[in-house]
Image: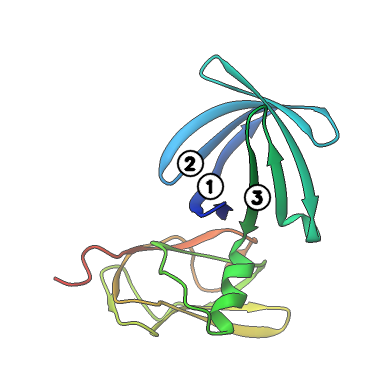
């Protein structure tokens, strides 16, 4: 998912969770933190032996937060795969990620591409059926299909990684 922290945009992926221990990838860099909720909205975070206390207050459907630490305050917005997809459908300019992630649970109806295919902007990479509607997921820029992680007919979950794209090789 995409997180906006003030003017910074970070891509965050949950890699694993066991009790309070959370493994994350932030902009491709993996880290492990111990997160404990001390009381509603107050968290203690341990990372590399350092302790941080954070207060979160939320608004509008838990997608926007005010994050307070001892010395700083940040406005944070969470942009999940579904929100990004809806922005794309409305025509909002969005950068192409190197992956296609399902914004909601559904079923893979068609995968009209294969690994190694060169796609042009607006080409359909995958078709998913959700809530009795078929949705075509198109790429925004020229790219190459790097990896397909699902098969036609497969039931998928929300935020599931479906296809990896190579954006750097598309101009060769």
Tell me if residue 103 can be seen.
no
Q: Is residue 100 above or below residue 142?
A: above
Judging depth in this view, the residue of 92 and 89 nearest the camera is 92
Query: Which mark is drawn over residue 13?
Result: 1
In this view, 62 is above or below 44: below
Callout 3: SS: strand
Please identify the residue farthest to the top as the structure is shown.
Answer: 49
| Dot 2 or dot 1, earlier in sequence | 1
Which mark's residue is nearer the viewer, 2 or 3? 3
- Residue visible at 42% across and 69% down in the picture: 95
Q: Tell me the colour scheme of the image.
A: rainbow
Q: CA distance from mark 1 to mark 3?
A: 20 Å
Percent of width and height locating residue 64: 71, 55
Residue 75 got which mark?
Answer: 3
Q: Residue at x 63, y 68 (%)?
A: 82
Circle 2: element type: strand
């Amino acid at each position: 998912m995409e997180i906006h922290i003030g003017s910074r945009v970070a891509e965050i992926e949950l890699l694993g969770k066991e009790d309070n221990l959370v493994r994350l990838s932030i902009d491709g860099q993996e880290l492990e933190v111990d997160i404990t909720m001390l009381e509603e909205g107050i968290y203690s975070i341990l990372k590399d032996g350092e302790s941080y206390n954070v207060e979160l207050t939320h608004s509008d459907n838990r997608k926007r937060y005010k994050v307070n630490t001892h010395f700083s305050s940040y406005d944070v917005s969470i942009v999940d795969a579904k929100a990004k997809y809806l922005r794309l459908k409305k025509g909002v300019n969005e950068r192409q990620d190197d992956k296609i992630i399902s914004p909601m649970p559904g079923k893979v109806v068609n995968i009209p591409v294969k690994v190694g295919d060169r796609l042009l902007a607006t080409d359909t990479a995958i078709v998913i059926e959700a809530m009795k509607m078929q949705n075509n997921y198109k790429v925004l820029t020229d790219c190459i299909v790097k990896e397909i992680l699902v098969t036609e007919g497969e039931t998928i979950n929300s935020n599931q990684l479906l296809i990896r794209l190579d954006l750097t090789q598309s101009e060769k």
